[in-house]
Amino acid sequence: MQNFIFYNPVCVHFGKGQIAALTSEIPTQFKVLMTYGGGSIKKNGVYDQVMEALKSHTIVEFPGIEPNPTYETCMKAVEIIRKEGIDYILSVGGGSVLDGSKFMAAAAKHQGEDPWDIVLGKEPVQEAVPLGCVLTLPATGSEMNGNSVISRSSTGQKRAFGSSRVMPQFSILDPETTFSLPKRQVANGVADAYTHVLEQYLTYDVNTPLQDRWSEGVLLTLIEEGRKTLDDMQDYEARANFMWAATMALNGILAAGVVQDWATHMIGHELTALYGIDHARTLAIVMPSLMEVAKDNKRKKLLQYGSRVFGITEKDGDEDQRVLSAIEKTRQFYESLEIPTRFSAYKDLDIKPDTPQIVAKRLSDQGLTALGEKGDITPEKVEEILALCA
Ligand code: NZQ
Ligand code: ZN
């Protein structure tokens, strides 16, 4: 096992009616900036529940954080935070609202010239406005981690940064708030969380049997409860299990001591930046092809994954065949969520034939020329992976 630091101070309030906990989580004397997205919270009753819980607080609202939150939008909030003397940020919505809120929390306290330097990793987060969250979309794990992914409209970039200083102090997860999600967003959430586990688990073995079994447990739960959730969109138990699995998929616990990949996410972010494809959908396109290209590096784990998650055993063929079956089962899993795994299915997006070259160049321009757990996903390999996605 590798050395690691595990630090996760997020207080999770999980279950029905938990939004009421806001009243005691945020001190009454604090001036709160309540951030949200395009209005889903006004339609599903979440906005009213938050307002009820915070009726003794002073609240300034900041709506309009878009999916794939932009630097430009967040900087408008930074102005308000500074001008109004905001003490606390409350994010109410999905991963995008929360990621945007994390960035503005850090940007508002930033001393340097341009807070974009935080996103580029040029400057660490020294200080941040404290924040909490009411999560309405299980997917990203942002509710229990210090990561944030921000896009910059003016340059077409989409970049991630991370700092324990922007971890939410608390996160409220009431599965009932997610019942208003359209099927597509639920499917995206299952696929995103599933891929988060693969990024941390499907690499090379450094003797981490506990982390491996936790990862396999999260994968199996997402397969089983994801199916139940999509088959019955009002099934509370299934929704609760899926929601908790998505949180566990990216809260640091699976990552402790293991070797991680994340090349699929890096390539996927470029596809979102170029074509606006939903985050989870980019992952479902890239992951099966990446597994194919990196199958020698991942061989031992692919066999273990195939056996423990999909029940692929020696009677199903020799090792090479079992590796291919595990990859095929992964593709089938994404497709079972009605997420197409090939560019050819995204006809309305006009995906250019030279996309593999464009993405490889965009990554190398950022210095990302050695991706993957062994640093051998070079620009040429990125091209190879994306050519297989056709
Ligand atoms: O804006 P509103 O009106 O709220 O609508 C949202 C949005 O249109 C809607 N929605 C959210 N909760 C709803 C709801 N609609 C009905 N009922 C509800 N209860 O769903 C749409 C998508 O929301 P968004 O927040 O964009 O989705 P998600 O949570 O999947 O977040 C995606 C973003 O997170 C980043 C992605 O790159 C992307 O920018 N990621 C963040 C990570 C992290 N912080 O750790 C890791 C991930 O790998 C990912 O990269
Ligand atoms: Zn993701």
Image (cartoon, rainbow, N blue to C red):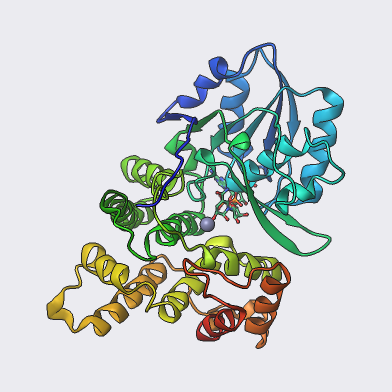
What residue do we see at 64% from left, 15% from top? 55
**Image position of 224 with respect to 98: above or below:** below
Indicate the position of residue 100 as horizontal and vertical percent values. 68, 44
**Image position of 102 with respect to 328: above or below:** above
What residue do we see at 39% from left, 54% from top? 258
Instruction: Tell me where residue 81 sits by quadrant.
Output: top right
Spot the residue most to the front.
3
Camera-side residue of 153 and 18: 153
Indicate the position of residue 173 as horizontal and vertical percent values. 47, 34
What residue do we see at 44% from left, 54% from top? 193
**Image position of 141 with respect to 90: above or below:** below
Spot the residue most to the bottom.
353
- Judge from the rendering whether residue 290 lies leftward or rightward of residue 101; answer left or right: left
What residue do we see at 41% from left, 71% from top? 335
Indicate the position of residue 204 as horizontal and vertical percent values. 36, 66
Instruction: Tell me where residue 13 sits by quadrant.
Output: top left
Tell how many labels: 0
- Judge from the rendering whether residue 301 lies leftward or rightward of residue 253; answer left or right: left
Indicate the position of residue 151 as horizontal and vertical percent values. 72, 56
